């Protein structure tokens, strides 16, 4: 599925693949490679919107020391190590 949208003289092309895998719908943003799933097509697309926004840094934030402690991690041990992609 390709969707072209005009936004004030700018053309935006978006391509999303939506497939059925067993009991789940899988939505994948072709440009970013980000994928998500849901029990319905609508849920898969909603989850994909959020995942792409997180990937692009449009929402979310870097975890605080308090977040790390809540997840059972010692902030002093994580130091300056690079965060995994999904946490950046």
Image (cartoon, grey):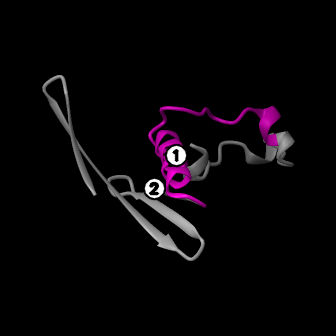
The alpha-carbon separation of the residues under discs 1 and 2 comes to 13 Å
Q: Is residue 73 found inside the magenta-colored segment of the image? A: no
Q: Residue furthest bottom?
A: 22
Q: Residue at x 60, y 61 (%)?
A: 39
Q: Residue at x 82, y 33 (%)?
A: 66
Q: Residue furthest left?
A: 9
Q: Position of residue 11 (x, y in %)?
A: 17, 36
Q: Is residue 17 left or right of residue 76?
A: left
Question: Mark 1 — residue?
Answer: 46
6 and 51: which is toward the camera? 6
Q: Secondary structure at mark 1?
A: helix
Identify the mark at residue 8; answer none if there is no mark: none
Q: Quadrant of residue 59?
A: top right
Q: Residue furthest top?
A: 8
Above or below residue 11? Residue 48 is below
Q: Position of residue 87 (x, y in %)?
A: 61, 46
Q: Is residue 67 found inside the magenta-colored segment of the image? A: yes
Q: Secondary structure at mark 2?
A: loop
Q: Residue at x 44, y 40 (%)?
A: 56
Question: Mark 2 — residue?
Answer: 34
Query: Which residues lie in the magenta part?
Result: 39-68
């Amino acid at each position: 599925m390709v969707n072209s949208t005009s936004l004030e003289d700018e053309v935006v092309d978006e391509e999303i693949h939506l497939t059925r895998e067993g009991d789940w719908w899988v939505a994948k943003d072709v440009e970013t490679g980000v994928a998500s799933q849901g029990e319905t097509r609508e849920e898969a697309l909603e989850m994909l919107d959020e995942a792409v926004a997180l990937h692009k840094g449009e929402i979310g934030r870097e975890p605080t020391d308090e977040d790390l402690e809540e997840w059972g991690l010692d902030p002093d041990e994580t130091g300056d190590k690079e965060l995994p992609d999904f946490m950046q």
